[in-house]
Image (cartoon, coloured by chain):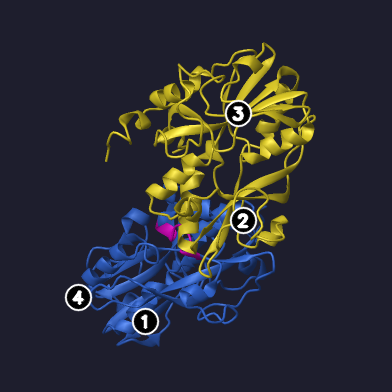
Chain colours: A blue, B yellow
Amino acid sequence: MLNAEDGLWRRAPESVRTRIRDGLITGPTAGLAPGYVQGNLCILPQDLAADFLRFAQGNPKPCPLIGVSETGSPLVPALGKTIDLRRDLPRYRVWKDGELVAEPTDITEFWHDDLVAFVIGCSFSFEEALIEDGIPLRHVACGSNVAMYRTNISCQPAGRLAGPMVVSMRPLKPADAIRAIQITSRFPSVHGAPVHIGKPELIGIADIHKPDYGDPVEIREDELPVFWACGVTPQAVIAAARPAFAITHYPGSMLVTDIRNSRLAAL
Amino acid sequence: MLNAEDGLWRRAPESVRTRIRDGLITGPTAGLAPGYVQGNLCILPQDLAADFLRFAQGNPKPCPLIGVSETGSPLVPALGKTIDLRRDLPRYRVWKDGELVAEPTDITEFWHDDLVAFVIGCSFSFEEALIEDGIPLRHVACGSNVAMYRTNISCQPAGRLAGPMVVSMRPLKPADAIRAIQITSRFPSVHGAPVHIGKPELIGIADIHKPDYGDPVEIREDELPVFWACGVTPQAVIAAARPAFAITHYPGSMLVTDIRNSRLAAL
């Protein structure tokens, strides 16, 4: 249902980006432009770009690349002809030598010719497919962030980039877990099938009630914890590598693209 | 490797059936004609055939029909032009009023014009796909029967046919369980994806170490029990309905068809 508050602009990626660019949206993008892919952003100096590309190639589940800019270009036309990565996200994080130095809503002043931008698929796409199939997601119902954990699963290292895989966890009834495996298998470019199910201790999670990122979530007696590779992995790995300069999106403030979620389906 | 004992005849469905027809094989068909579909057999009087077809339609996971004969015909040319269901299985079970009355190797003398034959997909096909993917199956390694359990999941009833779903269980490591869900999802006509994973008590299994059919199997600390709908379900339902007359295959002595397992893949 549409009304003046919940306007048509919410439905179209370009009009969402225009409002962001105009400074009218500075918070989370969840729920905006439903049906369209949102992406994690990671901007690095060119000297780390080859390592990052090799890291993504070796770790497609936590680090599914859906777009890469030319060196020095803030454009990713494959994801949307009008996208300008310097202005089209609600908020950014700017890092120097691994330390957070600013959280601006526009990074035009930080941009320079040496940077390469990477856009990584985000679980919003597969969560939409799960919800459309009638599978309830508790963190969505609670309005909280998904629970995320560092695991003892090592990523394939690449040059200066190495570290453990981070996973997100959603508690599901067994039949829903099976269906969720089927559905997310169709979306390899947004983390794909889960990497683990049940038994958190087997992947090095000591206390399922204490996530390393995000919010804890109840797991009921008739549910299993289901674990997907998480887009926080590459950010954690980059933070550990302490590059001279980096820019990422602010958590929850994603790039809204012109690509329909259904177009990411492998079959 | 082939030798005189392990002859080429084992590889071709028609030569396997010829040896069965000639009385040279009267035992299990596991491992014969690798790569080809084997089927459960159920022969019923015509007056129960419509109920059985409706039961199969309503319960495709436990009862995936891959062939049906014309009334009075022991042929199923869609599964193999030379198949004669009266002689091509190693051993049968003949039932009168729900009681087992004979276990012959040939049912020519029991055949009559009122019978309809149903062939139901069998887990051998998906187990082959799992093994080819490198997923170990303990009951195969142990040379035992798969463990099977009556559950509290009710089948969709149809006329005189009703009852609980029977499931088979295979213990798998979590990552193998996820992969097994992907692989078996491709084979809807041989039971398809699992119906349950973990937590046996949620589907009414009181003691996982005491299967209702088949042999118990060890479940290790790093494994989850994974449950598939089982072809024993329709047999159990028919036994409960106590038809005046029925013939089934003898457990493990299946119909070897000319259909390649890969042809059952949905995608």
- Amino acid type at circle 4 is Asp
Q: Earlier in the sequence, mark 2 or mark 4?
A: 4
Do dots 1 and 4 share one subunit? yes
Disc 2 chain ID: A
Q: Foreground residue, A234 or B189? A: B189
Q: Earlier in the sequence, mark 2 or mark 1?
A: 1
Tag 3–tag 1 contact (CB < 8 Å): no
Q: Which mark is residue A176?
A: 2
Q: Which mark is residue A47?
A: 4
Residue A141 visible, this orientation: yes
> Which residue lies at the image location 41% right of the left edge and 23% below the top edge?
B14
Disc 4 chain ID: A
Disc 1 chain ID: A
Stretch of the chain drawn in magenta? A189-196
Q: Measured from the top left, where is residue A60 in percent x and y?
A: 35, 62
Q: Earlier in the sequence, mark 1 or mark 4?
A: 4
Query: Mark 1 highlights which residue?
Result: A94
Disc 3 to disc 2, C-alpha distance? 39 Å
Marks 2, 1: nearer the viewer: 2
Query: Mark 3 highlights which residue?
Result: B92
Do dots 2 and 1 share one subunit? yes
> Which residue lies at the image location 42% right of the left edge and 45% below the top edge?
B129
Disc 3 chain ID: B
Q: Secondary structure at mark 1?
A: strand
Disc 2 to disc 4, C-alpha distance? 44 Å
Tag 2–tag 1 contact (CB < 8 Å): no
